[in-house]
Amino acid sequence: MDRPVPTARAERYAAFRHHAYLRFWAARLLINFATQIVSVAVGWLVYDLTRDPFKLGLVGIVQFIPSLLLFLVTGAVADRFGRRLIMGLAALLEAACAATLLVLTWSGAISAPTIFLVLAVFGVARAFFSPASASLVANLVPTDDFANAIAWNSSASQVATIAGPTAGGLLYGLSPTVAFATAAIMMTAGGLLALSIPKPEQQSEVEKPSLEVLFAGFRYIRGEKIVLGAISLDLFAVLLGGAIALLPVYARDILDLGPWGLGLLRSAPGIGSLAVAVWLAGHPVRDSAGVIMFICVGLFGFFTVVFGLSTITWLSVAALALTGAADMISVYVRETLIQLWTPDHLRGRVNAVNMVFIGASNEVGEFRAGTMAALIGTVPAVVVGGVGAIAVAALWAGLFPALRKVRRLDGRI
C-alpha cells in the first residue's frame, strides 16, 4: 500500500506533530522574547547613562566573552549531559540576571559598571544555553522533519525579535523596572517549560574528558569544509554588516525617534525574517541551496548600506526588514547544513564553536560598529560594514566551492 502524500498544510506544520518539539519551541519563544526586552532596555539605559556609542558596543562584547572563554566546556557538557536540563537551568540563570537588573534599577543603584557585571553573568548563562538548545532540536524530530523544525525555530526567534523590542521599548517607556520584571517572569516560565520536555534519546559522549575530546568539535569543523564554510561565512558577514548596536543612535540622533521608535527599528529585521521563515516552513529550499545562501548574504550587505544612508524613517524600517528577510534564508540554509552534517555525539561541541562564531559576528560585530562609529561616525561605520558583507559573500563563494555547490538540505550534496 502506498504511503499517503502529505498535504501542503501537513508539511508546513510537520515538526509540531512531535509534542516534545512543541514544548521546546514555546520555551525558546518565551526566552528569546524576554532576551529582546532585556536587550532594548539595557541598550537604552546604557545610552541614557553615558551618551557614548562606544559603551553600546561594550554591551555586546561583555556578553560574548563568556562564550569565548567557556566554549570548550559548554560544548562538552551539552554532549555528555541532558541538553534539556542544561537549557532549562541556563534560562533560570538568565531570569536571575533580569531580576538583578530589576532590583538595581528599583533601588537606584544602577550604573554602567553594574550593568556590565550582570551582563557578564548573563553571558555565562547564554554560553551554556545556546549549544544545548541548538543541539537538542535534532533529538526531538526525525530527519525528514528537521528542515521544517529549523524554519519554525527561526519563526520563534523572529516573533521574539519583532514583538520583543517593541514591547521592550514600550515597557521601558513605562519604567525600566517594569521591563526587567516582565523579562524575568518570561525567562522563568521558559526555563520551567524546557525542564518539562520528556527526556529524548541522545547519543552522549562516552570518552573520558581530555583535551582531545574537548577539541573534537574543532577537528570536525576543520575537516568538513561545508560546515567550516557555513560557520565562517556567518562570522565575517555579520561581524562586518551588523548595525544593531547603533540603532539607539539612529533612533535618537538621526531619525529623531524615542524609545518606541527604537523598538520599531529593532523589530524591523524580525518582520522580514518572520515572513520568510513562515514561507520557508511550507516552501522549503529544494535545490541550489548553496547559491541561494551566498546571494542572500550579498543582499544582506546591500540593504545594510541602504539603511546606513537613509534619513527617512519608512525607508530605514524597510531596509532593515529586507536585511532580516535576506538573512533568514541564509540562516535557514546554514543551520540546516550544520546540524545535518554533524554526528549527534559531536553536535554540542560543534554548536559551541558555532555559537562562538555567531557571538563573534553579533557581539563583537556590535563592538566593531560602536568603535568605528566613535572613530569615523555612525553612518560611515554602517555603510562600510555593509560593503564588507557583500565582499565576504563573493570571497567565500570562491573559497568554498563545495558549499556553493550544495543543492539539497537533506545531508546530501
Image: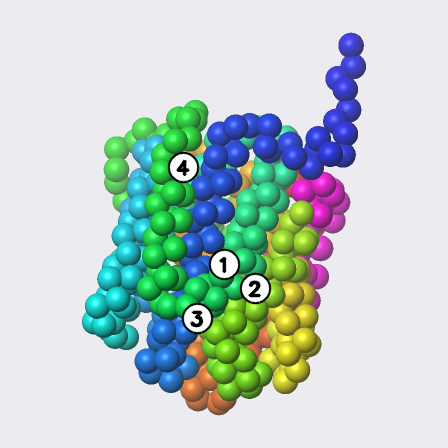
Crowding around mark 4 (Cα neighbors within 10 Å: few <14, some 14 to 19, many 20+) is some
- Please give the residue where the numbered disc 3 appears in the rendered image: 173
Residue pictured at 35% horizontal, 45% vertical: 188
The circle drawn on residue 267 is 2
Mark 2: amino acid: Ser
The circle drawn on residue 193 is 4
Q: Would you place residue 313 above or below residue 221 in this image?
A: below
> Does the magenta portion include 239?
no
Residue pictured at 31% horizontal, 46% vertical: 92
Q: Are marks 2 and 4 in contact (CB under 8 Å)?
A: no
SS at badge 1: helix
Alpha carbon distance from label 1 to label 4: 19 Å
The mark nearer the N terminus, 2 or 1, is 1
SS at badge 3: helix
Mark 1: amino acid: Gly
- Please give the residue where the numbered disc 1 appears in the rendered image: 164
> Does the magenta portion include 295?
yes
Q: Is residue 18 left or right of residue 101?
A: right
Q: Would you place residue 249 above or below residue 61 in this image?
A: below
Q: Are marks 3 and 2 in contact (CB under 8 Å)?
A: no
Q: Nearer the viewer, residue 279 or 196?
A: 196
Percent x, y of residue 218: 41, 49
Crowding around mark 3 (Cα neighbors within 10 Å: few <14, some 14 to 19, many 20+) is some
